[in-house]
Image: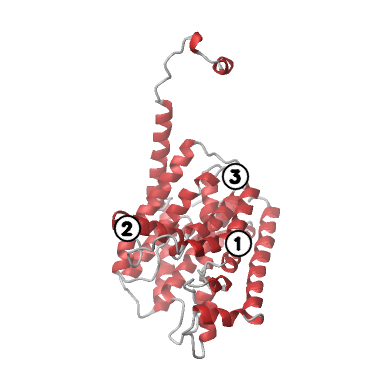
Amino acid sequence: MPLSTPRIAGVDVVRGLALLGMFSVHVFGAFEPDDSPTVAWQLAGGRSSATFALVAGVGLAFTTGGRTPRVGRGSLTAVTARALSVGLIGLLLGYAANAGGLQVDVILAFYALLFLLALPLLALRARTLACVALALGVVAPFLVHLLRGALPEPAFDGDPTLQDVVTDPAGLLGDLLVHGPYPVLAWTAYLCAGLAIGRLDLFDRRTATRLLTGGLALAATAWLACSLWLLRWGGLERLRQNEFPDATGPHARDEVLWDTPDGATWWSMLSRAPHSTSPFDLLHTLGAATALLAAVLLLTRITLVRRALLPLAAAGSMPLTLYTAHVLFLATGALNGSPDLQYAVLVAGSLLFAVGWRFTRGRGPLEALVAGAARRARDWERRRAQGSPPEPPVHRSERTESQDQHH
């Protein structure tokens, strides 16, 4: 596998790190048996999936022209086909997750809708996209809270499947938009931020430095502001009374700080817990994901570091394949009694497979499948545009003045 450019290597490495972080949360869970938060939840909870979504936006920007957006019908058709393919894989994966009794919350169906909603955003400039991302980070949590009472809740339990598309379409749409663990209405903020970053010159060290500074500032400001509100101004007790009335015992404080509130009251907007979908949560994870990407972009400018991180870059180049494989592996129940060993097997297996496949075959198997669907959709659109029947001839006496000027 040839060495990637610093830009592509950095994006792949960050995607690989996000994958390993999501693996850790799915293996170790959120809380220990004594109700204290796990290290995986404290470090990767919410941040890994947010990084995954942000880097998905960067990749979407790359596939639609990079710094010079290409948003013709062919590109839009290709993105649509890519989204539908990812969604189909996610709905099929839901059967395995439900059969295995997993608490993974498969993210792929949410991604599919996220990509579809991003179609009108592809032509926007980087500055506009950044403003939209920040605005959504502040406003979208309140909209999600409001719409939870208006949109129908899903009738199904667990992850959505193909059957739910037919039997409960309204519930499925409500789940994807507001009720689920990755409400698309709010998570569009991550995709917009990723699109904005992907429209920048990521070869430029100054660009990465500005992203690092801005990301750290946003993450720290959101975290500190929420901490002041919770720990100094009485917000923690308000949150406990309204969202966690049963929280008692030595770890009640940890539960309120780290457990995801149900969103039954407006006080949930004070939470900074992973996946709480509050303004503090969205802005903190948005800043953290941006800062991580920028830091890795700077590090991978160093050839030695880039070589050392090749296994992570290889894993990050095939996230759909490895994400699907890890859900299927967890669904088997193998090594459930030994989470440390289970995580080690997942990480080692993913890295070894990714490096071997990348060296010998190139693109990941599911990535090739999705890319093929997108390519065929683009070719179909091109043929359709070229093969459209010509307009019937118009006599000069029937032409309007504007048509004469055009000709």
Residue 168: which numbered mark, if any? 2
Name the residue located 51 percent from the left edge and 68 percent from the top edge. Answer: 46
Residue 355: which numbered mark, if any? none
Which of disc 2 and disc 3 is earlier in sequence?
3
Secondary element at tag 3: loop
Describe residue 384's horizontal placement relative to residue 59 as left or right.
left
Give the Cα distance between marks 3 and 2: 34 Å
Residue 124: which numbered mark, if any? 3
Q: Is residue 107 visible?
A: yes
Q: Please say if the residues under marks 3 and 2 sit with CB atoms less than 8 Å apart.
A: no
Residue 364's x, y, as percent? 41, 53
Q: According to the image, label 1 marks what residue?
A: 138
Secondary element at tag 2: loop
Q: Quadrant of residue 236?
A: bottom right
Three-letter code for the amino acid on which mark 1 is drawn: Val
Mark 3 neighbour class, 10 Å CA radius: few under 14, some 14 to 19, many 20 or more: some
